[in-house]
Image (cartoon, grey):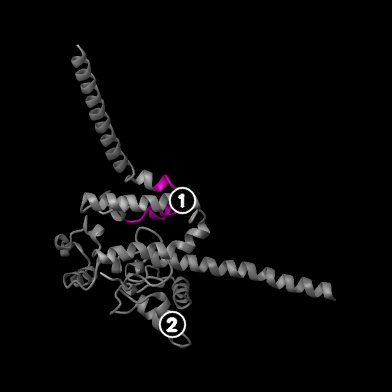
Amino acid sequence: MKTTLKIIVAGVFACAVPLGMVHAADDAAAAAEIKKSGCLTCHSVSAKKDGPSFKSIAEKHKGKADGADLVKTQITASKEHKQHLKTKDEAQVKNVVEYILSR
Amino acid sequence: MQDWSKLKLGIVVALVTLGGTVLAGIASVAGVVLTGTEEFCSTACHSMNIPAAEFKDTIHDTNRTGVRATCADCHIPHHSVVAMLVTKTKAGIKDIYGEMTGVIDTKEKYEKERYGMAVQVWTVMKQTDSRECRHCHTATKMNPENQSETARKKHEALKSGGMTCIDCHFGIAHSEPDGPGPQELKVAK
């Protein structure tokens, strides 16, 4: 019984490793898209630049249900925030939004 | 006869001293020049491999015109020879000591010190109104027609003296550290 339990626990942790790696890969993809789209000209991850830092954007939208939608509109369609993501792929856009809101 | 020997000796000594001084002078100037090259800065100290690798492919490394700004262009003053020599001497002593004692001799140690090193440089830039940037970039000679509307509007802030280059243009040559940036630094001018 004890051995079985140990194996199960070990298995759960083993699954967490590739899941963690997938998350890291998403971060890298998001960072690459952000760089490609020229966002870093005005935004930094943690420092105030021309625009707010991703950290402060994440803080501002913390716990808010519409946070993701607001950020998505800003970086894909907003007329005031004229600079938009280069990619039009929904999954990549969602990934970038999640990346920003998780800083 | 004795007088001639003394005179000859005197002349030889004077010539050797003069020659030695000239050679020492040439060697010093060569030393100052050679320790300001991109090759020296990025390879003489192991720890500098990291910022050198980060610099690669950035806008100051490679761009449309091939005009570059390398280590000394941004980190060593050019406005006065004395300032240049003082900075190189102070930094050189500090860096040699640091390299010998391994302050940033591993990636982990480097990352730990990254923010502090960035703040050191940003502080100097804020105190000097980004003097080293302005050695190449003259704001009054920036052609607005060649800039995007956003850039044009933002550079208006330079005229009032409210902002300096480094306030926005940081993390462009080396990877940006985590933490508050130049705009959030309190700097005594």
Residue B168: quadrant of the picture: bottom left
Q: Which residue is drawn at 27% across and 30% down?
A: B20
Pointer 1 residue: B99
Q: Does the magenta stretch include residue B43?
A: yes
Pointer 2 residue: A59
Q: Is residue B122 magenta?
A: no
Q: Which residue is drawn at 21% across and 55% down?
A: B135
Question: Relative to B136, is B179 on the left or the right?
Answer: right
Magenta segment range? B42-59
Q: Which residue is drawn at 40% across and 79% down?
A: A56
Same chain shared by disc 2 and disc 1: no
Where is residue A38? Give x, y as percent.
Answer: 34, 66
Where is residue A1? Give x, y as percent.
Answer: 85, 76
Residue at the far top in the pictured view: B1
Q: How crowded is mark 1: few (under 14 residues within 10 Å), some or many (20 or more)?
A: some
Q: Circle 2 marks a residue in which chain?
A: A
Q: Which amino acid does label 2 sit on?
A: Glu
Q: Residues within 10 Å of mark 2 (few under 14, many from 20)?
A: few
Kind of element beneath mark 1 = helix
How far is mark 2 from mark 1, CA to CA?
A: 39 Å
Relative to residue A2, is residue B55 depicted above or below?
Answer: above
Residue at the far front in the pictured view: B2
